[in-house]
Amino acid sequence: LCVKGIVAAEKQFHGIAVAYPPFTLQETTEHGMSWELSKAALKTQGYKAIIEFAPWGRAFSDSKNGKYDGVLIAYWTHDRSEYFVYPDCPIAFVTTGFFKKAGRTDITYSGDLRDISSLDIGVERGASMG
């Protein structure tokens, strides 16, 4: 959970997230483990937590521009740290990886991004791989 400035005085936290199972879930009432942890932490401080879901680009932009109190969950990047406050102790750790179509023996990856620099790789708009 990263937050934008000071939360509204009425003790309500209005967050936005992208469905990213198991961390955030849109189709359940619990909304995933990261939301449940964040909601419990906010409750200890007297805040009622409300969550909405949107595509990542909109969630980040709307939170950055103050429409929401925070965005759940967001990798730390230097650019994002200029707009958001991240917790000292992350609530989740995520490992990312590359997937290729079965049978594509022409694609190899050693851990050096130059290995795949000639390929077209799809990522979610506005997303960061850490």
Image (cartoon, grey):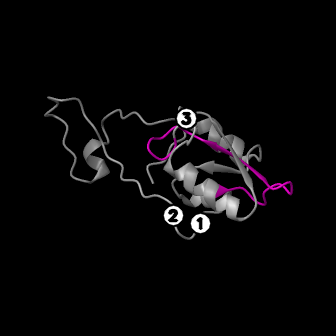
Q: On the rendered structure, is 123 left or right of 52? A: left
Residue 116 location, x and y as percent? 28, 42
Q: What residue does disc 3 label?
A: 26
| Residue beneath the point at 36% across and 35% down | 121
Alpha carbon of mark 1 to alpha carbon of mark 2: how far?
6 Å
Look at mark 1 in the image and give the residue it sits on: 87
Q: Residues within 10 Å of mark 2 (few under 14, many from 20)?
A: few
Which residues are the magenta region?
1-24
Pick out the residue farthest to the bottom. 88
| Residue type at the position of mark 3 | Gln
User: Is there a contact, CB below 8 Å, between mark 1 and mark 2?
Assistant: yes
Residue type of the residue flagged with mark 1: Pro
The secondary structure that dominates the magenta segment is: loop
The quadrant of the rendering that contains the N terminus is bottom right
**Foreground of the two, 118 or 67:** 67
**Callout 3 environment at 10 Å: few (<14), some (14 to 19), or many (20+)?**
some
Relative placement, left or right, of 116 versus 46 is left
